[in-house]
Amino acid sequence: MHLNFSAFLPATLLLGLAAGAARAQTTPTIARPSATLTVAEGAGTVSIPLSITNPGAAASTVQVTVQPFGTATAGQDYTYATTQTLTFPAGATGAQTLTIPILDDATAEETEYFVVRLVSPTNATVSATANDILVYIRDNDTPVPVRANNLALSLVQSYQTATPFSGTNQINSAEISAYDATTKRLYVANSIGGKLDILNLANPAAIAAVASVPIGTYGGLNSVAVRNGVVACAIENSSPQQNGSVVFFDQNGVFLKQVTVGALPDMITFSPDGRYVLTANEGEPNAAYTTDPEGSVSVIDVSGGIASLAQTNVTTATFTAYNTQAAALRAQGIRIYGGLAASPSTVAQDLEPEYIAVSANSQTAYITLQENNAIAVLDLATKQITGLRPVGYSDHTQPGRSLDASDQTTDILMANWPLKGMRQPDAIASFEMGGVSYLLTANEGDAREYGTSANPGLIEAVRLGNAAYPLDATAFPYANLLKNNNVLGRLNVTNKLGDTDGDGDFDEIYVFGGRSFSIYNAATGAEVHDSGNLLERVTAADPTYGALFNASNAFEAPTRKNRSDDKGPEPEGVTTGRIGANLYAFVSLERVGGVMVFNINNPAAPVLETYANNRSLTASTGDLGPEGIVFIPAADSPTGQPLLLLANEVSSTIAVYSIQVSTPTAARPGQGTEPLAAYPNPSQGAPVRLSRAVSGTLHDLAGRPVRQLRATDRLDTNGLAAGLYLLRADDGAATKLVVN
């Protein structure tokens, strides 16, 4: 028999329980307006309206405190001296507004932010997971990146090699192109269409199709290179985890020879002296992650001519010698993390060659290992891998390393965050300056995603806000706020790096790609320069393409900022070219599109020259998805002027730009120079970090020189009296510095 216990309770007790339940249901709740607010630095104040629901018969209060998390400084960027208390009168339903003064300084800064928290409510409750409010302060002193404009890129033609889409299905592409100066022909890898497209570039304003060579009988076409009428194609096997091949054609696409190379040859190039053809054999696993071939680099000696070429001319360099060094490589910063829990990958399986650059003397090849965040070194004399080098991480807490991290905010908010960017370079180029060899990398980023949600093999990309990505409470006491979609919640991060103590949560946050290009000393691997946030700043400030900031390259109308939560502009391709006495770097941006040009006469301090793009602001037309990039010097150009070619994968177009050198009007002191900023400012006696390396002089208020700087990005303020100082760089830039 079921007993009804309420029947035995006194009526007064039942009434009391009912009244208590009613009171519990109507407890006043104080809530924030949203997790984030944005205010302009010059707005004067920011207002935070707090609401109350179910107001009680007595007044309710809540205290608002500033938290020790953020990049804005109290007393310098905003005013908030003590904890403030807001009172909601009894029975009142209106909001109570907290007003915080915003200070308008004259310092060029990133978007800064501070956090206030709702604490100690009386006669009310506050959600413990929604009690923080992050206030973004958009700086009004940060200058638009200056373009030197010593050269200009003029679009000659955007030539569509084939119809790219059938409905929503892509049926053709133009991923990689190669130019032969001897024939004035361009060879285009149409990977999706399975064809090698041959174009006549004798008149770049009227490109003409010559032939389209089907490649399907050989396998899948990934890349193409050409030299003196010999065309070399990197072909993956019809079963991609098996060894691939290089197929040689003559200038008309007539088959010459075929040799076997490693699994999934992804990129191909000739050495500068023409002796070797090299392939980067990525060796990716299959989708189910049940087969994972080794990555490798194949070297084909073609010095005897293609007619006598045989398989004995092919040497494939592997990474098996490193199989016992996995732990040491990880300690160096090289990502070795592939395979399944029951069967981890060997080092040789885990390393995935992506792109190759060969030194000017044809003695050394440098190979990017994109997923592994590293570069391999290959001795072409011995055809042995002689070194593995980590390329490092971009510390997004540092000046000049900010990023726009959310696709949900309306504003572009270039802010510093506790993130580390895995540079993960795609393309790489080799160049020399002043007798020193350097490497230039496009830090695109890439994630491994093999398997399905039902049967995951290795899927490392996860949203930071996902419950499956727990943040360590000690390292990230504001985890609930960081996981908000208007903060970092939408950001894609890796779940294969950052759990430093192995307890299942993440103590460090690593994101994909550096959103930058880097320059390294080729001999030592030392970092010489990283462009930091410059690529995003240039596109954000562009008078035309700022409307497409961090937009994707999909064959649909562009959406501003829809790649901010991923890898931003995704620098994909790089090359260099000399025009007169100047050496230039060209960096293509796969997502927003177009190409940026930098003078790299000083590899430690590249100078932005210009940015060119050719895509619609409203439709899926124009050039979409630049992948391959080719510089044609004037001596090899059909027009007698240097040309730049972009192969656009999504739109299946070849964009031809003519390069004109201009002589700018003489600049006033400080005009046309990269802005200069100092951090922290005010200084507390510790060394100050400058936004870029400069030579110059620090002056006190009387104009007296007190410090001399020589090609450095650090300034020692120890021993300086408190006060205001002015740093003048030799290139005309200047910034004020307060020493406390």
Image (tube, rainbow, N blue to C red):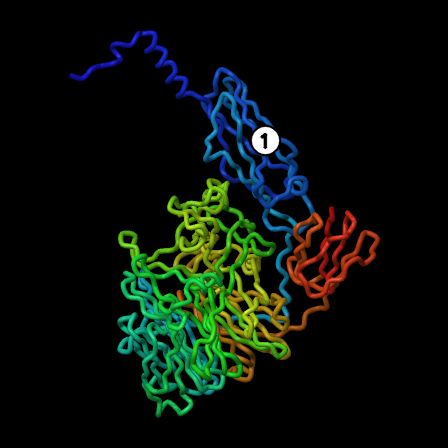
Q: Secondary structure at mark 1?
A: strand
Vertical order, 471 against 672 (above or below): above
Residue 5, position as x, y percentages in the image: 25, 14
Q: Quadrant of residue 236?
A: bottom left
Residue at position x 81%, y 58% in the image:
705
Residue 681, position as x, y percentages in the image: 68, 49
Residue 211 appears in the rendering: yes
**Residue toward you, 506 or 452:** 506
Q: Which residue is mark 1?
A: 98
Residue 678 lies left or right of residue 341; in this view the side is right
Residue 616 appears in the rendering: no
Specify the farthest residue to the left: 1
Residue 728, position as x, y percentages in the image: 75, 59
Residue 619 lies left or right of residue 7; in this view the side is right
> In which quadrant will I find the N terminus?
top left
Give the residue type that dot 1 points to. Leu
User: How many other residues sit within 10 Å of disc 1, few (<14), some (14-19) or many (≥20)?
Assistant: some
